[in-house]
């Protein structure tokens, strides 16, 4: 619901992540940019094998030496508790993952033949079908345009709905985002005088409040970005300049996007330390209000936080956990994201400070959430504060058009990260994943086939 501009106006953008329930089943794929090289397969495919061994000293050692003999590199070895067969003989099961280009290779055939006499069972396990996820940075091109709206199609109650010039501009910037390819420089936007004036109005309203209520990590990054990325009242910074700075600091990068993405697609970007960011700005008639994420929200709210190592790691942790996860777990992760990256608070010298972008880009809600006086943010009401606990936050519902009734408070950003990591480790995932920053690819600990929800693209190898 839109609100009139007032002291209570919820100026924050709707964060760039929709409640999962409204987005999970919407495909809306527009088509990815062409021409970029892509790595769609795991560079070293893995094979999983189940071995059943008799319970006797040295049985496992005997078996493992054949992997070495055939030069098959073991990447995981997992045992199961002892069992008894019908004759009362003890047996052990072992699961072994090893690297091999094919289960039909000569080496694997020789291994199976050798193991026949020394195991009671030796069988290759089929790959597990999982929800599709990008395995390489280039594959973000396949999801970046799966926006849930077209970016320029405004709702009838949007402040710019009747402004054709504004709508044309939105269309122009949506095209820039849709045509972006992962290994290119991010196009520079020549912002108009009106757009810079809108940015300046937001800057003026936020500056003093950020000094009072933003966490120290935000404030130090913001100061640095004034020096290095062109942040100023008179200039809207460029995504490429921010990316250059963040890459040096924490390895994070921005990536232009035309509109809202589903939770699954949005979180997948974070796994690559990539933040999908809009490039348009709110309508100049209501500079302190926006019904959707815009550059004021992305660049003032989000970008400075990605220069902090703990916060960057925290964000990537959520992204990695989302890869291939069930719909239910993606929703939990998306809700954790909402209650932290968007609306998180932390403690500092006995005061509550904001680290969530939904607060850092909203003058009313920032004051409402952090100030110890009332009225604050135009209301006498006080929110409920809960200690940061991803298990609770992941199932805590929230409104998207009003101030949050509940905020989660971390002891510190490091505390937020370590609790998030523990939570992610406890999720029942089909595989474990790691990001390799040198190759910008995702390593997984067992063979998987990305068979569910594959992006629609003719020349894309779906089963990689
Ligand atoms: Fe956001």
Image (cartoon, rainbow, N blue to C red):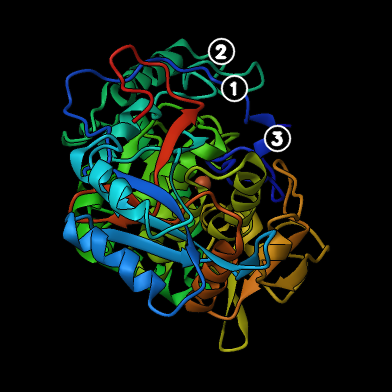
Identity of the residue drawn at 32% across and 18% down: 175
User: Residue at label 3?
Assistant: 21
Q: Residue at x 69, y 50 (%)?
A: 7
Measured as percent of width and height from the top left, residue 92 is found at 53, 66
State the mark number for residue 426: none
Label 1 vs 2, first from the N-terminus = 1
| Residue 62 visible in the current orientation | yes
Q: Which mark is residue 162?
A: 2
Q: CA distance from mark 1 to mark 3?
A: 10 Å
Label 2 sits on a secondary structure element that is loop
Figure quadrant of residue 191: top left
In terms of depth relative to the viewer, which is nearer, 100 or 94?
94
Give the image location of residue 457, x and y in percent.
Answer: 36, 15
Q: Disc 1 marks which residue?
A: 26
Picture coordinates of residue 94 (x, y %)? 47, 62
Work out whether mark 1 precedes mark 3 in sequence or the reverse, and give the earlier one.
3
Quadrant of residue 87 within the rendered picture: bottom right
């Amino acid at each position: 619901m839109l609100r009139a501009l007032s002291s209570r106006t919820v100026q924050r953008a709707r964060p760039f992540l929709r409640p999962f329930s409204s987005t999970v089943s919407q495909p809306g794929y527009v088509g990815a940019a062409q021409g970029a090289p892509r790595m769609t397969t795991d560079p070293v495919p893995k094979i999983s094998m189940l071995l059943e061994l008799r319970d006797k000293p040295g049985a496992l050692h005997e078996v493992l030496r054949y992997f070495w003999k055939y030069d098959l590199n073991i990447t995981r070895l997992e045992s199961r508790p002892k069992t008894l067969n019908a004759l009362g003989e003890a047996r052990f099961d072992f699961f072994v993952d090893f690297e091999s280009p094919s289960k039909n290779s000569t080496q694997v055939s020789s291994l199976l033949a050798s193991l026949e006499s020394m195991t009671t069972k030796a069988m290759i396990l089929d790959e597990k079908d999982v929800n599709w996820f990008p395995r390489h940075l280039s594959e973000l091109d396949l999801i970046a345009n799966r926006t849930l709206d077209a970016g320029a199609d405004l709702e009838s109650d949007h402040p710019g709905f009747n402004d054709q010039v504004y709508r044309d501009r939105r269309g122009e910037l949506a095209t820039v985002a849709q045509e972006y390819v992962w290994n290119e420089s991010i196009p520079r936007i020549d912002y108009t005088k009106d757009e810079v004036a809108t940015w300046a109005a937001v800057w003026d309203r936020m500056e003093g409040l950020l000094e009072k209520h933003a966490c120290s990590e935000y404030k130090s990054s913001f100061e640095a970005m004034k020096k290095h990325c062109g942040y100023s009242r008179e200039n809207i910074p460029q995504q490429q300049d921010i990316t250059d700075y963040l890459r040096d600091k924490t390895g994070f990068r921005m990536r232009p996007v035309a509109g809202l993405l589903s939770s699954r697609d949005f979180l997948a970007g974070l796994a690559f330390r990539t933040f999908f960011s809009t490039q348009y700005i709110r309508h100049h008639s209501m500079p302190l209000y926006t019904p959707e994420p815009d550059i004021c929200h992305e660049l003032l709210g989000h970008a400075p936080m990605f220069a902090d190592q703990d916060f960057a790691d925290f964000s990537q942790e959520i992204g990695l956990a989302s890869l291939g996860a069930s719909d239910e777990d993606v929703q939990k992760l998306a809700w954790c994201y909402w209650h932290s990256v968007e609306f998180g608070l932390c403690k500092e010298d006995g005061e509550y400070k904001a680290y969530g972008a939904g607060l850092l880009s909203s003058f009313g809600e920032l004051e409402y959430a952090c100030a110890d006086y009332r009225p604050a943010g135009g209301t006498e009401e006080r929110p409920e504060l809960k200690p940061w606990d991803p298990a609770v936050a992941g199932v805590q519902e929230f409104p998207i058009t009003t101030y949050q009734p509940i905020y989660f408070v971390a002891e510190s950003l490091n505390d937020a990260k370590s609790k998030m990591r523990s939570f992610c480790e406890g999720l029942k995932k089909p595989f474990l994943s790691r990001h390799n920053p040198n190759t910008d690819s995702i390593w997984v600990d067992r063979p998987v086939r990305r068979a569910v929800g594959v992006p629609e693209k003719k020349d894309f190898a779906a089963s990689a």
